[in-house]
Image (cartoon, rainbow, N blue to C red):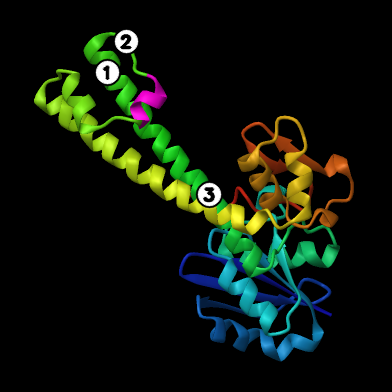
Amino acid sequence: MKYSGIDLHSNNSVVTVTDENDRVVAEKRLPNDLAKILGILTPWRDELAGVVVESTFNWYWLVDGLQAAGFTVHLAHTAAIKKYEGLKHSGDETDARYLAHLMRLGILPTGAILPPEQRAVRDLARKRMQLVRSRCQHILAVENITARQHGTRITSNQAMGLSAETIDQMRLQEDVALAIRANAAVIATLYAQIEILEKRLQEKVTVQAEYALLTSVPGIGLILATTILLETGPIERFASAGNWFCCSKGVGTRNVDMISIAYDPRE
């Protein structure tokens, strides 16, 4: 039996194939080209127990391509992998070998690999969250500017509803007013885009029975229900209710079979 680990980077990957004794039988650094990666793995296809890919920000293309080619793929939960002193050394090759080693021992922490169409809707919800955070930053900027100029803050609702006329009525210095106009323009644009995304998300999730169940829970509104549903994925992947965790800041999990929500820091 053979085991493969892939240390995935932004533009290249180290592909390793090891045997039952952790001896390397094939290893090479390759550009992130699916054909080249399949080229080194295909000769071992019938012997491979699986291929481990790191849950990095750019894993979609590789995991989907390997699965389409018939390989059994595991998504490594990198945040849960303990790098024991003396067991793992620095270097991309040893990183790839360590992933294969954990799979051979049967102790590899893994993440869920959702189908591409489900990931697309989930990522759309994450994009909405990104835009909401950005809108909040601009609202806070307007509130801070008015506090500096007048000693009191305007409310967030007032900041979101600012128009050219209301900004003129503030009687601010020209450059200060220009700064607020810039924030107001961005807020309006973000508000419009968020509405578009929310409408699309509602079209996708309201047809699911689980969505109706979630919205029946006191305190769970339309947006939170959408987030919980999309980040959870198939509930069957959680061994018990205790393996699933939801916090006030979003949806997470304590399960080894994690939700791949926090592994692209730029999201």
Estimate the x, y position of residue 173 in percent, counting from the top left: 11, 21
Question: Is 159 within the magenta?
Answer: yes
The quadrant of the rendering that contains the N terminus is bottom right
Tell which of 27 and 240 is nearer to you: 240
Q: Residue furthest bottom?
A: 43
Please report the residue visible at 51 percent of the width from the left and 44 percent of the height from the top. 129
Estimate the x, y position of residue 233 in percent, counting from the top left: 73, 56
What numbered label is drawn on residue 146?
A: 1
Q: Earlier in the sequence, mark 1 or mark 2?
A: 1
Tell which of 205 and 260 is nearer to you: 205
Within 10 Å of the Cα at label 3, are there few (<14), some (14-19), or many (20+) other Cα atoms?
A: some
Q: Tell me the amino acid under the disc marked 3.
A: Glu
Q: Tell me the amino acid under the disc marked 1.
A: Thr
Q: Image check: 51 left or right of 171?
A: right
Estimate the x, y position of residue 145 in percent, counting from the top left: 26, 21
**Residue bearing mark 2:** 152
Q: Given this view, does label 3 or label 1 mark the residue nearer the observer?
A: 3
Which quadrant of the view contains residue 162? top left
Q: Given this view, does label 3 or label 2 mark the residue nearer the observer?
A: 3
Q: Residue furthest top?
A: 151
Element type at mark 2: loop
Instruction: Tell me the CA gap for discs 3 and 1.
Output: 30 Å
Q: Residue furthest right?
A: 240
Which quadrant of the view contains residue 23? bottom right
Q: Earlier in the sequence, mark 3 or mark 1?
A: 1
Instruction: Tell me the CA gap for discs 1 and 2.
Output: 7 Å
Please report the residue visible at 55 percent of the width from the left and 85 percent of the height from the top. 36
The range drawn in magenta is 155-160
